[in-house]
Image (spheres, rainbow, N blue to C red):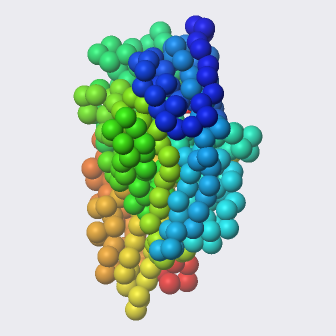
Amino acid sequence: MLPFSYVRAGDAGTAIALVRASPDSAFLAGGTTEVDLVRQDVLRPGLLVDINDLPLDLIEDLPDGGLRIGALARMSDVARAPGVIERFPVISQALVLGASAQLRNMASMGGNLCQRVRCSYFRDPASPCNKRDPGSGCAALNGFHRGHAILGTSDHCIATHPSDVAVPLTALDAVVHTSGPGGERAIGIDDFFLLPGDTPQREHPLEHGELITAIEVPGAPVARRSVYLKFRDRQSYEFALASVAAAIRIEDGAIAEVRLALGGVGTRPWRARRAEAALLGRPASAASFAGAAREELAQARPRPMNAFKVELAQRAIVRALSTLTDGEA
Ligand SMILES: Cc1cc2nc3c(=O)[nH]c(=O)nc-3n(C[C@H](O)[C@H](O)[C@H](O)COP(=O)(O)OP(=O)(O)OC[C@H]3O[C@@H](n4cnc5c(N)ncnc54)[C@H](O)[C@@H]3O)c2cc1C
Ligand code: SF4
């Protein structure tokens, strides 16, 4: 680990200006990703700008029934906020199923969206990795890739996006608010997570020094009936092999509205739009759910060690939708 400077910013303008001024600087929130990677010599910042004094930790109910979650709100505080539990149970469940209690007390929502991939080659500076060292190659393609992605991959990177809470945020069309050198921006979640393509080192559209200030979730009555299921090698303190965020509304026996997103299988949180389209107007039956899941996963590009995820993700979709429609399906 190389020595680095540390400064604690008192306001957003100072934090942004400090990071902006040096190309090898970064924001520091809970530090649960950043400090790990510095210790592992994967990141070598010259300056860390601590943003924990900024007033960005509020969790507010919006007039349209939505939520505004400050970037520094801790995962555990968001998970137990009454408005989240009542109106967006899928968000609360995804948070509780992530990391450990200690980590959730430290980790911020902004940091969660910016956390780095768990690919072991990315975290091993001796291995080729296009994300860490662009142009060096991807050791996972022909290496150990059991946990890697089957959707949204490229020949340059197949790492899975690791966040749990980003999955329901994707299903619910959340908006990421930022403040930066160019002023304030609102970035739809679909545009926030970039596919790896031939630039896997670029994971989101933030400029250097652009600060996430809040995440807004628009009002969505459908989310009152929602669930997050996570499938992994052990039942706690583990990343997903596949996960699903689902919300559904049935009218007169047919599916009138549905939101679906997958985690653990995509290079970004994966909105299952093909499955959503296939479900609309259909009866809420196991056959409809299985057909829609097949349709979504038809675009998967598995590799030898992670081919099991195709079946796992399909079963996850069916299980989530069946759970929500118990008695109706
Ligand atoms: C052992 C372990 C297990 C875990 N398991 C899970 C899991 O199961 N599910 C899951 O979802 N996550 C899991 N995590 C990841 C954890 O949720 C993230 O590390 C955490 O959310 C990051 O938040 P932070 O505040 O600590 O970010 P930091 O480590 O402080 O920062 C992370 C990155 O975000 C940037 N950043 C932070 N805040 C902002 C901001 N406001 N604007 C712009 N950039 C910002 C930083 O510069 C840095 O690049 C796990 C982590 C560990 C260590
Ligand atoms: S999958 Fe991505 S993160 Fe992992 S080694 Fe390949 S390029 Fe690096």
Residue extending furthest toward the bottom: 252
* Left or right of residue 270: residue 225: right
Residue 129: percent from left, percent from top: 39, 19
Q: How many marks?
A: 0
Specify whether residue 157 is in view.
Answer: no
266 is higher (above) or lower (below) than 20: below
Q: Residue 155: where, in percent of width, then height?
A: 27, 28
Ligand 1: image quarter: top right
Give the image quarter of residue 39. Answer: top right
Left or right: 305 in relation to 100: left
Residue 73 vs 286, above or below: the answer is: above
> At x 67% / y 62%, what residue is drawn?
81
Q: Position of residue 132 (x, y in %)?
A: 41, 20
- Residue placed furthest toward the right: 102
Q: Is residue 308 above or below residue 174?
A: above
Left or right of 14 on screen, residue 177: left
Identity of the residue drawn at 67% across and 67% down: 82
- Which residue is at 43% across, 63% downward? 172
On the image, the x and y values in percent for residue 18 come to: 49, 25
Residue at position x 52%, y 13% from top? Answer: 46
Residue 48 in view here: yes
Closer to us: 154 or 308: 154
Q: Which quadrant of the figure has residue 203?
A: top left
Query: In front: 221, or 146?
Result: 221
63 or 155: nearer the viewer: 63
Tell me the quarter of the image containing the N terminus: top right
Q: Is 44 placed above or below 265 here?
A: above
